[in-house]
Image: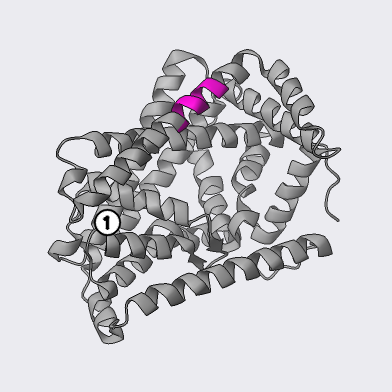
Amino acid sequence: MLSEDCEFSPFMDKKRILASVVVFLILAVLVYLQYRHWRTFDWGTFWSQTHRIKKIHVLHGIALIYLGYLMRALRWKIFLKPVRPKTTARELISPTLVGFTGIALLGRAGEFIRPYLIARRTDLPFSSQLAVWAVERIFDVGAFAVLTVAAIFLPTALPSIPHPEYYRRFQEAGFALIALVVGTTVVAIIIGRNGEAAAQWVEQRFSHLSSNFGHKMAEKVREFGTGLNTIHGPLSLLWLTLVSVGMWYVIALAYQEVTHSYGVDALAIPVSQLLILMGSSMVGSMLQLPAVGGGSQMATIATLSSVFDVPPEMAASCGILLWLVTFAAVVPVGLLLAHRERLSLRKLSVESHQAEKLDTGSPPTS
């Protein structure tokens, strides 16, 4: 499936190779610094801790992650209701799983596969589903922020962490999240009411940077405005919000199942505190290698060790297992569905990026 030859431009190949080399070097330095700090790291203890996990909890965690994917399909169905009211969540499950498999195996190169497949399946313009994808991210950030802020400011939640001195930093992060959500909401309202005017302002504001940059930014604003039009009234907004918050809570429960699978007090972390661990993993995921990860595992391991006082060997084992369950577990089913539907992930990646460039008026890669 992944071996099918596809035409990548030499320029794109060089960019991806350079980006991968830079990420690899940064991750190598981080790994070196981490294990240099853990001078007493015992690989025997690491393997012992890994083999002692209760597998039923891991299976429960994987089931919850798949439930999260089903909720993503349901949310996209709500987005499609104004234009494709007969589309069911069941029809969107396969594109969702294949799309996230593309991200897991190809990294950023696979991020447009899901909206591209949904556009093909529903016979809608790809640009319209890119718009939905952009708005979906806003709901993700908002829902996660709601849960995290609630955890940070609840009196009985984070103050009980092993290192209370971190609580002040988490409070500051909570205020930053609130500001981000409020700012994003204001921008969304402005674009929703005056989308074309906002796009023209952006194009004029950034046109001096390059001949095409301002135009690209303006098209992104117009796409985002199109995505906002899929929120069909207050009831639709309410359902989208509830599904988004519920989905992220389900993911938090999956994290809890994995941490509790070790059966030790150090990892008996309540859901309210695991949201901090999820946040660190999301930040670390910005530094990822395709099919390997790296950034999210490092961030998770560092947080478990420094914030929750988890021993190094157990923190390393748990960080890797969390990545496998929450990020990589979709791959077997996604590849099976792709094989059944005769889809090539690399070809879909190329086609989706070419379609995105055509939609923004850029010359496609050859």
Residue at 78% from the left image edge and 43% from the top image edge:
357
Q: Is 104 placed left or right of 19 in the picture? A: left
Given residues 298 and 357, the one toward you in this image is 298
Q: Quadrant of residue 72?
A: top left
Residue at 56% from the left image edge and 63% from the top image edge:
105
Q: Is residue 107 above or below residue 84?
A: below
Q: Which quadrant: the N terminus?
A: bottom right
Residue at 27% from the left image edge and 34% from the top image edge:
150
Does residue 1 show up?
Answer: no
Q: Secondary structure at mark 1?
A: helix
Does residue 136 show up?
Answer: yes
Q: Is 356 placed left or right of 342 in the picture? A: right
> How far across and how far down the image is residue 142, in percent?
43, 32
- Within 10 angstroms of label 1, few (less than 14), some, or many (20 or more) residues? some
Amino acid type assigned to the residue bearing label 1 in the image: His
Given residues 85 and 155, the one toward you in this image is 155
- Is 181 a magenta residue? yes
Query: What are the residue bounds of the magenta stretch?
Result: 180-187
Residue position marked by numbered label 1 in the rendering:
60
> How far across and how far down the image is residue 314, in percent?
26, 71
Residue at 45% from the left image edge and 62% from the top image edge:
328
What is the basis of the colouring in this image?
A: one colour
> How far across and how far down the image is residue 332, in percent?
48, 63
Q: Quadrant of residue 215?
A: top right
Given residues 214 and 357, the one toward you in this image is 214
